[in-house]
Amino acid sequence: MTILIRPFESGDLDSVVQIENQVFTTPWSKQSFLDCSRWPEFWFRVAEQNKKVVGYFVAQVVPPEAELHNIAVDPAFQKKGVGRLLLSHLLTEIKKVGVKDVFLLVRPSNIAAIHLYQQFEFCLLDKRPRYYEDTKEDALIFYKALDT
């Protein structure tokens, strides 16, 4: 399975929104993705196989820090290494522009994502109580220092 990671293009929007709606209980709006695509500090990348968008991430990159805001993989392509490839790509590329610290928030119930982050040596830093409005679930704050 050959996966290409590339910058988001406007023609990807419907595929990204479809994946978002399949994966998350409180999905981002189409407008949120468009807004992120317009600001240079937001890195919006898609994973593509055979010209089909199968995943994406959105990260805010302001060296020396970055925050991963959203990462998702089409359910039909989950557990096939796409999420790992997206996260690896992000970490490699942000290091090149001087990022030293990476942060992200995740629901405690998102076990698959937590497992992925731990594989990349993200550490639990703290939590934000009752952060998610739909379930009143806490947000776990994960952190990774990038080696220089």
Image (spheres, helix red, strand yellow):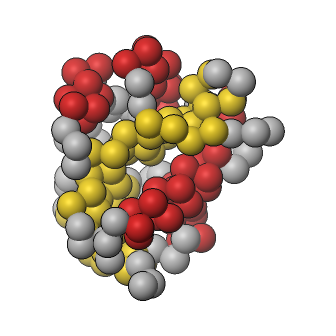
How far across and how far down the image is residue 41, in percent?
Answer: 22, 49
Please, which residue is most extreme toward the bottom here?
Answer: 148
Nearer to us in this view, 87 or 126: 87
Above or below 31: residue 113: below
Name the residue at 48% across, 52% down. 110
How far across and how far down the image is residue 102, in percent?
Answer: 34, 68
Q: Quadrant of the C terminus?
A: bottom left
How far across and how far down the image is residue 89, in percent?
Answer: 53, 56
Nearer to us in this view, 74 or 129: 74
Q: Quadrant of the N terminus?
A: top right
Name the residue at 55% across, 71% down. 120
Q: Is residue 69 visible?
A: no
Please, which residue is most extreme toward the right here?
Answer: 1
Instruction: Tell me the quarter of the picture where residue 126 sits.
Output: bottom left
Nearer to us in this view, 98 or 55: 98
Please, which residue is most extreme toward the front here?
Answer: 96
Above or below 53: residue 43: below
